[in-house]
Amino acid sequence: QVQLVESGGGLVQAGGSLRLSCAASGNIFSINTMGWDRQGPGKQREYVATISSGGRVNLADSVKGRFTISRDNAKNTVYLQMNSLEPEDTAVYYCNADVTTGIRLNTYWGQGTQVTVSS
């Protein structure tokens, strides 16, 4: 089995910064794409960012210029640096990873971490 554990969420004022981390552990042969989604109160889950194993990055338009995604392949960890936070960024943030275990490729999700931005 594979576990993804997020950390780094919390309460911050508008204009502030937070850094989320997500560490994958378990029966991991390799990890391809890692990323983040979020779900705000009363909203559908939305895409935030992904990063390939080779470092190719994609970001949602709503966070470009404010959020940065990175990863440490040696630690099986993905990060989301969030700057210039806005109240609209308030959400539960979920990390995900495409993990190969043996010969099977599956997508795994973390349990979520709450980010609250006050105005």
Image: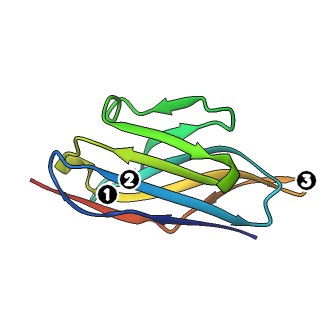
In percent of width and height, residue 89 lies at 26, 49
In percent of width and height, residue 35 lies at 54, 46
Label annotation for residue 83: none
> Label 1, label 2: how many angstroms apart (C-alpha)?
14 Å
State the residue at coordinates (69%, 51%). Answer: 74
Locate the N terminus and report the quarter of the image it occupies: bottom right
Q: Which of marks 3 and 1 precedes in the sequence?
A: 1
Amino acid type at circle 2 is Arg
Residue on which disc 3 sits: 103
Amino acid type at circle 1 is Ala
State the residue at coordinates (20%, 49%). Answer: 16
The relative height of residue 91 versus residue 52 in the rendered view (above or below) is below
Number of callouts = 3
In percent of width and height, residue 75 lies at 65, 56
Q: Nearer the viewer, mark 1 or mark 2?
A: 2
Pick out the residue farthest to the right. Answer: 103
Residue 65, image quadrant: top left
Residue on which disc 2 sits: 19
* Label 2 close to label 3 by CB (< 8 Å): no
Q: Secondary structure at mark 2?
A: strand
Q: Secondary structure at mark 3?
A: loop
Q: Which of marks 3 and 2 precedes in the sequence?
A: 2
Amino acid type at circle 3 is Ile
Pick out the residue farthest to the front. Answer: 74
* Label 1 close to label 3 by CB (< 8 Å): no
Q: Is residue 59 left or right of residue 53?
A: left
Residue 2, image quadrant: bottom right
Q: Which of marks 2 and 1 precedes in the sequence?
A: 2
Instruction: Sort mark 1 into few (<14), some (14-19) or many (20+) by Cα contacts within 10 Å.
Output: many
Please tell me which residue lies in front, 66 or 110. Answer: 66
Colouring mode (rainbow / by chain / secondary structure / one colour): rainbow
